[in-house]
Image (tube, rainbow, N blue to C red):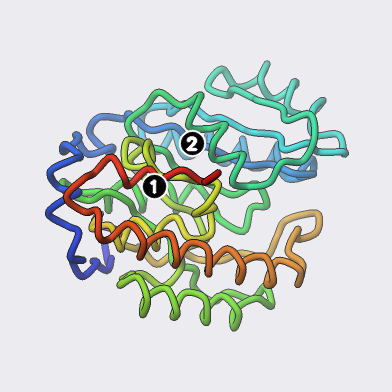
């Protein structure tokens, strides 16, 4: 297995003192597969069938949590049928679209396992290959594993490369793809202000705070069905989010001897 490690940040000793080591997920099986879904009705049956194949290959099942983020297609009905077919599947419905960051927050209130695998509902990732790859990469001492899309062809490569390059320079992030599938220790997220960091910069901030974040090359596939939710308006919002995250992070560096400040207060 090929994966890339992270260069340690100055805050590494602090975080090592705060977070205990957990048993690796390939041994403990303490992993929940979280799938965000927005109008992915045509993809969900195929995705769940792939996850079933994955579990048969692994030799054990993992809990799967699909969070329907206010879909307006047939997703609720399809998910109800899939729950009857797959005992490992739990579904939570948002009454309206709330966005990926809120999906993360919902997952954190529901998931009880030590690890969260963040998947994709559009089948641009194949869990039959990607889930075992990330599980095997999470060796002792690793806090997060990111998938690194190979042969990506979705038209967003240049903007993604720029964002990742900036975060590698500013936050000391050692990976190339921070907004893809990922396997993360749940306890590392407990005190992070997700409303501020957002899902976009989660791995960048974890890297800067000294958590060990590594990556595994994974194959990118064209979306099986439906349309991408990406719009160029996201470039503006992600740029604004980046400035807010940057100001927040450098404001807490002077408090590294007082860990309680790391949680921050977004409303202030």
At 65% from the left and 25% from the top, the residue drawn is 92
Q: Nearer the viewer, residue 99 or 192?
A: 192
Q: Position of residue 6 (x, y in %)?
A: 24, 67
Real-space CA distance between mark 2 and mark 1, rounded to the nearest whole angstrom: 9 Å
- Seen as rendered, the residue at the extreme right is 73
Side (left or right) of 231 relative to 171? right
Residue at label 2?
A: 33
Q: Are marks 2 and 1 in contact (CB under 8 Å)?
A: no
Q: Residues within 10 Å of mark 1 (few under 14, many from 20)?
A: many
Q: Position of residue 57 (x, y in %)?
A: 40, 38
Q: Secondary structure at mark 2?
A: strand
Residue at label 1?
A: 183
At 36% from the left and 80% from the top, the residue drawn is 169
- Seen as rendered, the residue at the extreme front is 268
Quadrant placement of the N terminus:
bottom left
Q: Position of residue 206 (x, y in %)?
A: 34, 55
Side (left or right) of 127 relative to 112? right
Q: Nearer the viewer, residue 94 or 259?
A: 259
Side (left or right) of 221 relative to 29? right
Location of residue 82 by image quarter: top right
Q: Nearer the viewer, residue 93 or 52?
A: 93
Location of residue 204 by image quarter: bottom left
Tell me the tag on residue 102: none
Q: Nearer the viewer, residue 148 or 268?
A: 268
Sequence-first tag of 2 and 1: 2
Q: Position of residue 81 (x, y in %)?
A: 75, 21
At 61% from the left and 64% from the top, the residue drawn is 221
Q: Secondary structure at mark 1?
A: strand
At 72% from the left and 38% from the top, the residue drawn is 69
State whether residue 202 is above or below residue 45: below
State whether residue 80 is above or below residue 46: above
């Amino acid at each position: 297995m090929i994966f890339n490690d992270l260069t340690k940040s100055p805050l590494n000793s602090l975080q090592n003192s705060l977070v205990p080591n957990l048993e690796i997920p390939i041994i403990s099986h303490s992993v929940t597969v979280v799938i965000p879904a927005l109008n992915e009705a045509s993809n969900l049956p195929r995705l769940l069938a792939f996850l079933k194949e994955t579990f048969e290959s692994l030799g054990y099942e993992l809990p799967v949590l699909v969070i329907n983020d206010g879909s307006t297609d047939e997703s609720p009905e399809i998910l109800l049928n899939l729950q009857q077919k797959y005992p490992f599947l739990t579904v939570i419905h948002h009454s309206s679209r709330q966005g990926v960051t809120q999906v993360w927050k919902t997952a954190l209130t529901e998931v009880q396992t030590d690890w969260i695998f963040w998947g994709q509902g559009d089948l641009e990732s194949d869990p039959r290959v990607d889930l075992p790859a990330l599980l095997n990469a999470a060796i002792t001492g690793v806090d997060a594993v990111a998938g690194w899309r190979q042969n990506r062809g979705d038209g967003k490569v240049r903007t993604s490369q720029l964002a990742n390059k900036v975060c590698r320079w500013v936050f000391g992030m050692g990976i190339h793809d921070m907004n893809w599938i990922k396997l993360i220790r749940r306890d590392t997220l407990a005190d992070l202000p997700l409303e501020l960091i957002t899902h976009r910069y989660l791995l960048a901030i974890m890297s800067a705070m000294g958590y060990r974040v590594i990556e595994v090359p994974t194959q990118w596939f064209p979306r099986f069905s439906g349309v991408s939710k990406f719009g160029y308006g996201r470039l503006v919002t992600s740029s604004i989010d980046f400035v807010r995250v940057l100001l927040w992070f450098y404001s807490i560096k002077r408090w590294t001897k007082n860990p309680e400040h790391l949680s921050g207060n977004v409303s202030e």
